[in-house]
């Protein structure tokens, strides 16, 4: 592996459950000519200085996460959105070393397509904040409190989306109301969920 980065080796060495699978995925990805870096504590592969994909392990599978996977041609429907709210990234999941070996040609094709997307400068169209559902409980709070409404509208679109997703997630109205109450002062201060 001529493109491998020694700073990333620890990730593969500490892997217990998916060591062989991750090593095989690494070999396929490095064979594409991508540069290997360490970002977010996981192996990240770049082209033209831009992130193309990540390798990561979970309890039930290991995966290649394509940053712009939503734009990749996927005739065999192998790519998976990690969550319902994922807009751009898609995973190609593997459950065994045999699975990696069997699908290595498909993985190479996805990697090459992802590289071509970066070379072309293609961007994923992300949903506008206005396209996200506003929970009824938040609508009621905003309507009843003009200061809260003004503060929420003054938040950056990313902070607004973060709150909308967080507030909408619980199934029970009581939990949604509790979350809104908990973050009311943060919204009034112009802060996001993680600030």
Image (cartoon, rainbow, N blue to C red):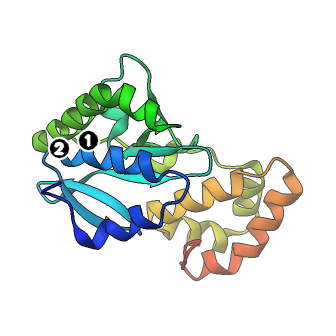
Residue 34 in the image: state x and y as whole percent.
17, 51
Q: Image height check: is 3 above or below 107?
A: below
Q: Is residue 77 left or right of residue 9?
A: right
Quickly name the residue at label 2: 31
The quarter of the image holding the C terminus is bottom right
The answer to which of 63 and 152 lies nearer the viewer is: 63
CA gap between label 2 and label 1 equals 5 Å
The answer to which of 10 and 54 lies nearer the viewer is: 10
Q: Image height check: is 92 above or below 52?
A: above
Mark 1 surroundings: few (<14), some (14-19) or many (≥20) residues within 10 A:
some
Mark 2 surroundings: few (<14), some (14-19) or many (≥20) residues within 10 A:
some
The answer to which of 165 and 40 lies nearer the viewer is: 40
Residue 190 in the image: state x and y as whole percent.
54, 78
The answer to which of 74 and 26 lies nearer the viewer is: 26
Q: Is residue 67 visible?
A: no
Residue sitting at x 82%, y 61%: 177
* Number of numbered callouts drawn: 2
Residue sitting at x 41%, y 69%: 41
Q: Do the residues labelled 2 and 1 touch (CB within 8 Å)?
A: yes
Mark number for residue 9?
A: none
Q: In this view, does 158 lie to the left or right of 37?
A: right
- Report the residue that reaches farthest toward the top: 75
Name the image quarter holding residue 75.
top left
Residue 97 in the image: state x and y as whole percent.
45, 38
Mark number for residue 28?
A: 1
Residue sitting at x 24%, y 33%: 108
What secondary structure is marked by label 1?
helix
Q: Can residue 29 be seen in this view?
A: yes
Residue 4 in the image: state x and y as whole percent.
20, 60
Residue sitting at x 78%, y 71%: 181
What secondary structure is marked by label 2?
loop
């Amino acid at each position: 592996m001529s493109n491998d980065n020694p700073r990333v080796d620890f990730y593969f060495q500490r892997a217990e459950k998916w060591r062989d699978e991750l090593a095989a995925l690494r070999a396929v990805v490095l064979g594409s000519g991508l540069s290997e870096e360490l970002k977010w504590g996981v192996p990240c592969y770049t082209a033209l200085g831009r992130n193309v994909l990540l390798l990561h392990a979970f309890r039930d599978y290991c995966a290649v996460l394509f940053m712009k996977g939503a734009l990749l041609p996927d005739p065999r429907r192998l790519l998976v959105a990690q969550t319902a709210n994922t807009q751009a990234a898609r995973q190609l999941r593997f459950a065994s070393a045999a699975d990696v070996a069997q699908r290595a040609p498909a993985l190479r094709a996805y990697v090459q397509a992802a590289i071509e997307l970066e070379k072309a400068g293609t961007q994923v169209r992300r949903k506008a904040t206005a396209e996200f559902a506003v929970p009824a409980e938040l609508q009621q709070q905003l309507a009843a409190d003009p200061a809260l409404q003004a503060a929420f509208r003054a938040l950056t679109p990313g902070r607004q989306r973060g709150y909308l997703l967080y507030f909408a997630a619980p199934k029970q109205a009581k939990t949604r109301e509790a979350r809104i109450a908990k973050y009311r002062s943060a919204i009034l201060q112009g802060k996001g969920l993680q600030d």
